[in-house]
Every structure is written in structure tokens, then in C-alpha cells.
Amino acid sequence: MNDPDQKHSKNIASLLGPVLIAVTLSEAINLHIWADSFPQVTYLNGMILFSVGLAVVRFHNRWLPAWTVTITILGWLMLVAGLFRLFFPGAEQAGGSPATYVFIGGLCLLGLFLTLKAYC
């Protein structure tokens, strides 16, 4: 691991991976809280998503065909999701549909993948 870019990617993955795992598992367990969410909470969530997404995109905007592109794509997704929640905090939030659980499960698997890449 002499490549500084690889080390940088592993550092970001070591943060994003466990966070994704914790957030997705806790959301899957507590998905019902979004049914009665307050726009203020959704707005705050949007600020956090936007800030983290912007930081990832700013410091890790790499589009090489390697596992590290996963971090870049995740950063862009967080940035766009954050903007959506900032500008539309009153919009309908995810419900308890099977598609929501599939999406959450996919994000959890992404978190596991990043964690394994960072720590193994």
C-alpha cells in the first residue's frame, strides 16, 4: 500500500463503511420514525448528508475503474440526497415498503464492502 491515493481511499472507507452499517441497521429497525418526521429533522439530515457528501466529493473525486470509485459515487449520492432533503424537507419520506428495505440492505452491504476494504 505505497500508493498514497490507495491509503487516502482506505482512510475514507474506514469511516464511511462503519457509519453506513450503523445508519442502515438503525434505520431498518426504526423506519417507522420517518412516517411522522418533522421537516426540521429532515432538513438537519439533509445538511449532514450534503456536508459529508461535499467533503467526500471534494477530497475523493476519483473515477478510476477500481473499488475506490465506490467512494466517489457514494459521495455524489450523499450530496444529491442532502440537497433534495434541504430543498424539499416536507416531501414524502421512505415508507415501510419492501423496496425501501432492499435499498437499505444494499447500502448496508456497501458499508460492509467499504469496511472490509479499509480494514482487511
Image: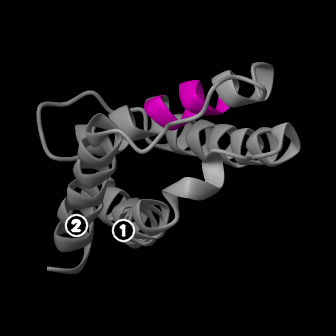
User: In terms of secondary structure, where does tag 2 sit?
Assistant: helix
Mark 2 → mark 1, Cα distance in angstroms: 7 Å
Q: Is residue 19 toward the left or the right of residue 102 in the image?
A: right
Magenta span: predominant SS is helix
**Image location of residue 93, percent across then percent down:** 59, 34
Above or below, 5 relative to 58: below
Q: Quadrant of residue 100?
A: top left
Q: Residue at x 23, y 80 (%)?
A: 119
Quadrant in the picture for the C terminus: bottom left
Labels 2 & 1 near each other (Cβ < 8 A) = yes
Could you say which is closer to the camera, residue 37 or residue 82? 37
Q: How many marks?
A: 2
Which of 8/35 is in front? 35
Residue span colored magenta: 77-82
Residue shown at the point (30%, 48%) measured from the top left = 101
Give the residue number, with chain letter if any, for mark 1: 21
Structural crowding at the residue carrying mark 2, measured as other residues with C-alpha within 10 Å and reported as few (<14), some (14–19) or many (≥20)? some
Q: Report the residue at 31% width, 50% height from top.
A: 107
**54 in relation to 10, above or below:** above
Q: Position of residue 9 (x, y in %)?
A: 33, 56
Q: Is residue 42 left or right of residue 110?
A: right
The location of residue 92, given as percent across then percent down, is: 63, 26
Q: Toward the viewer: 95 or 59?
A: 95
Horizontal side of residue 65 vs 63, given as left or right: left
Q: For numbered disc 1, what is the local secondary structure?
A: helix
Colour basis: one colour
Magenta includes 87? no
Q: Quadrant of the N terminus?
A: bottom left
Q: Earlier in the sequence, mark 2 or mark 1?
A: 1
The kind of residue on which mark 2 rests is Leu
Q: Specify few, some or many for label 1: CA neighbours under 10 Å numbering under 14, 14-19, or 20 or more.
A: many
Quarter holding residue 55:
top right
